[in-house]
Amino acid sequence: MGSSTVVEAVEVVEAGEMLDVVEAGEMLDVVDYRLGSSGAEQERLLAQCELLRPAAAALLDTIPLPPRANALDLGCGPLGVLDLLSERVGPGGSVTGLDTDDRMIGWARESVAELALDNVEVRHEALPPAAAAEAVYDLVHCRLLLINTTHPRRILGSMAASVRSGGWVAVQEFDWATWQCDPPHPAWSRLKALLTEVFGGDVHIGARLPGLLSEAGLTDVRATAHAYYWRPGDRYQTLLLSFAHLFRDRLLEHTPLTPEELDALTGALQEHLEQPRTTVRESLLVQAWARKP
Ligand SMILES: C[S@@+](CC[C@H](N)C(=O)[O-])C[C@H]1O[C@@H](n2cnc3c(N)ncnc32)[C@H](O)[C@@H]1O
């Protein structure tokens, strides 16, 4: 699956339709994670785990788990919510972390060892569609996985299939709709629009989570959302610029931007974000959870 195929699809149809096209065509199993697995990405994800920890803890606290529960974190990255799940299932329970990237797996195993999470195992695996007999989990969770794939329905279907009757699926994803700087700036709007085209997944998937959970045959669907604000000096205030840097090659390959235009846009935006009164309202973190009948 060449990455350019996804970009073409994003350019010609609405995001939701694009996902259907990809799913119907079974064009790929795993999209390479476009933010990569560099040391910088490990550090970014671990810092993000800290930032999102209170919201994740609040989400997991609303989900009743039986004694000695089995929980799964799909696409756990270097930590995900493995530590939070470990606490909640207790010593008699078990937690599995799955990821498809070797370096992420290595880092997750390091985190598990450092934190002495004795009830957690990390494996290199995508979640295959489960037969009813394999539906063993009391809770299957993923965070910021679906936004990075072109086949969220298939992943959610596998998650739902892996949960036992009465168990839970919980998902946390961003919706870029709220991501804006204040005062507004044309360089922000243009870069965000171009990044939306080349990102590779549906950047508004957060808003679709409750509907997708219902479509996966789950009931008692609930959702909530969190917004974060950043000032100059906060690391996430410049995240759009970081993405422009990370996606530079794709921006130049798949949009009409020339290198000079891209440099001018990022330069203008950097200057704007450095102004003492420029704040950034982050993407909305949507949390949705539902039960298997
Ligand atoms: C943005 S990171 C999120 C990591 C973690 N969930 C967190 O919240 O910190 C996305 C992770 O999903 C993994 N991934 C991508 N596609 C996957 C798939 N089909 N199955 C399992 N993991 C996948 C990537 O390797 C990456 O570690």
Image (spheres, rainbow, N blue to C red):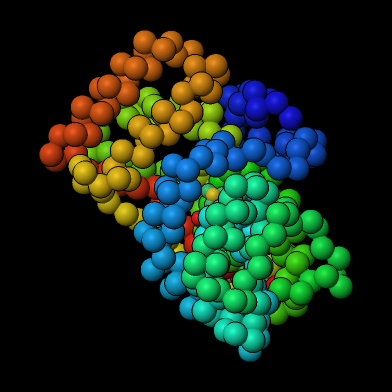
Would residue 170 appear left or right of 124 to someone viewing this image?
Answer: left
Quadrant location of the N terminus in the rendered image: top right
The one nearer the camera, 270 or 224, is 270
Question: Which quarter of the picture shows residue 279?
Answer: top left
Q: Residue at x 49, y 70 (%)?
A: 115
Would residue 20 appear left or right of 206 to someone viewing this image?
Answer: right
Q: Residue at x 64, y 82 (%)?
A: 93
Would residue 63 appear left or right of 140 to someone viewing this image?
Answer: left
Determine if residue 241 is in view. Answer: yes
Q: Is residue 67 shown above or below 179?
A: below
Determine if residue 202 is in view. Answer: no
Quadrant location of the C terminus in the rendered image: bottom right
Would residue 162 appear left or right of 205 to someone viewing this image?
Answer: right
Q: Residue at x 45, y 72 (%)?
A: 57
Count of numbered tags: 0
Image location (x, y in percent) of residue 177 = 42, 43
Q: Is residue 45 shown above or below 29?
A: below
Image location (x, y in percent) of residue 272 = 21, 30
Image location (x, y in percent) of residue 36 = 55, 38
